[in-house]
Image (cartoon, rainbow, N blue to C red):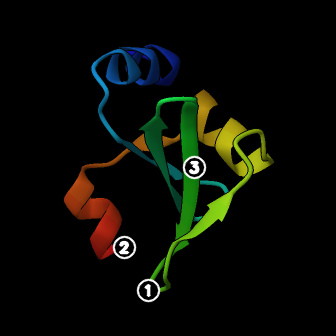
Amino acid sequence: MTNDRYIYESFKKGKEIYIMDDLEDVAVRYCPTKEGYKTYAKFKGESEYKIYEKSNIVTRADMGGTILTKEQYYSY
């Protein structure tokens, strides 16, 4: 399944999504909301922070990042 398809199917179900942007070595969390979704980034060993939904990091993760589990994201 492509990332775009995985993201689409997960949002339809109201699930959070976790993807690693392999180029920047940053994990991205997509959090569904009533208005759409919010995105957060997390570098290894650091706290997550909110990022713009159309940032380059989110775009790269959408296009070809590695899908993570919730546990992988939070332990990163």
Circle 1: is it few (<14), some (14-19), or many (20+) Cα within 10 Å? few
For marks 2 and 3 on the same chain, the one whose residue lies earlier in the sequence: 3
Tell me the residue that label 1 is attached to: 45
Q: Of all residues shown, which one is farthest toward the left?
A: 71
Tell me the residue that label 2 is attached to: 76
Q: Secondary structure at mark 3?
A: strand
Q: Mark 2 against mark 3, which lies toward the viewer?
A: 3
Image x and y of residue 33, in percent? 47, 36
- Total labels drawn: 3
Circle 2: is it few (<14), some (14-19), or many (20+) Cα within 10 Å? some
Asked if residue 28 shows in the view, the reply is yes
Q: Work out whether 31 lies above or below 74.
A: above
Front residue of 41/26: it is 41
Q: Are marks 1 and 3 in contact (CB under 8 Å)?
A: no
Q: Secondary structure at mark 1?
A: loop
Image x and y of residue 56, in percent? 79, 46
What residue sits 52% from the left and 70% below the top?
A: 42
The residues tagged by marks 2 and 1 sit, at their Cα atoms, a distance apart of: 6 Å
What residue sits 62% from the left and 63% below the top?
A: 50
Tell me the residue that label 3 is attached to: 39
- Is residue 62 shown left or right of residue 11? right
Quadrant that contains the C terminus: bottom left
